[in-house]
Amino acid sequence: MPKTIRCLLLIPAVFFCILNAARGFRCGGNIISKGDSKPEVLHHCGEPDWTDTRQRETFERYGRDWRKRYITVSEWLYNPGPTALIRILTFEENRLVDIRTEGFGYIQGGASRGNTRADMISVGDSKAEVFAQWGEPAEKTEFPEERTIRKSNGRVLEYTVTVSIWTYPSNFGTRVLRFEDGALVDID
């Protein structure tokens, strides 16, 4: 078979693999994908290597008014070791809503983590993404912070943001990270 035809036949196969990887990932011989429940993922993948759970406050339109609603958001990190990619799963309530791939895994307790270079993380990263790059912080603090929004009709909506402060020792002093509702907002 000519080389050109072989290459043309290979293109759909590569596209199919990329499409499958975007939908989910293989765990214990099963495909984990969006919509799966926490018990299904636990059954196929076992306990995650790291978890974070928080309440996210949202507003829903209810007739002419707005109503607060609390959603439980959980992030699970699976570390398959240094020869495979880390997977970060996000659940809302008990359903899987997002699967992200982070860099290569790490050796549990190994020296490959704890590098607190600021270029390894960025504002907007989740706690799981920061954990995958920098490891467990030396100190964690979490507290609620009240906020308000003034709507165009003059109504004021009050809501709560969960603030987490993570502290890491580094060669250049202490690094302090501020998260709001699980997203990194400041690197100090």
Image (cartoon, helix red, strand yellow):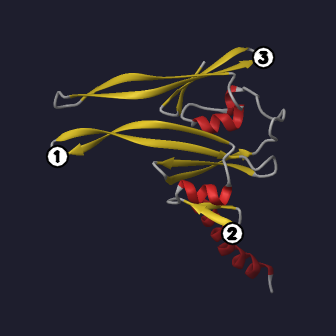
Q: Label 2 sits on what residue type?
A: Val
Q: Label 1 sits on what residue type?
A: Gly
The residue singled out by tag 1 in the image is: 63
> Mark 3 or mark 1: which is in front?
1
Tag shown at residue 42: none
Residue at the image point whose x is 68% and y is 26% from the top: 137
Q: Is residue 172 above or below residue 181?
A: above
Question: Quick one: label 3 or label 1, which is nearer the N terminus?
Answer: 1
Question: Splitting the image into 4 quarters, where does residue 103 fall?
Answer: top right
Question: Quick one: label 1 or label 2, which is nearer the N terminus?
Answer: 2
Left or right placement of residue 12 versus residue 83 in this view: left
User: Mark 1–mark 2 contact, CB under 8 Å?
Assistant: no
Q: Percent from the top left, x then y, of residue 118?
A: 68, 26
Left or right placement of residue 77 versus residue 157 in this view: right
The residue singled out by tag 3 in the image is: 171
Query: Around disc 2, counting alpha carbons within 10 Å, would you say few (fewer than 14), some (14 to 19), or many (20 or more)?
Result: few
The residue singled out by tag 2 in the image is: 14
Task: Name the quarter where the C terminus is drawn.
Answer: top right
Circle 2: element type:
helix
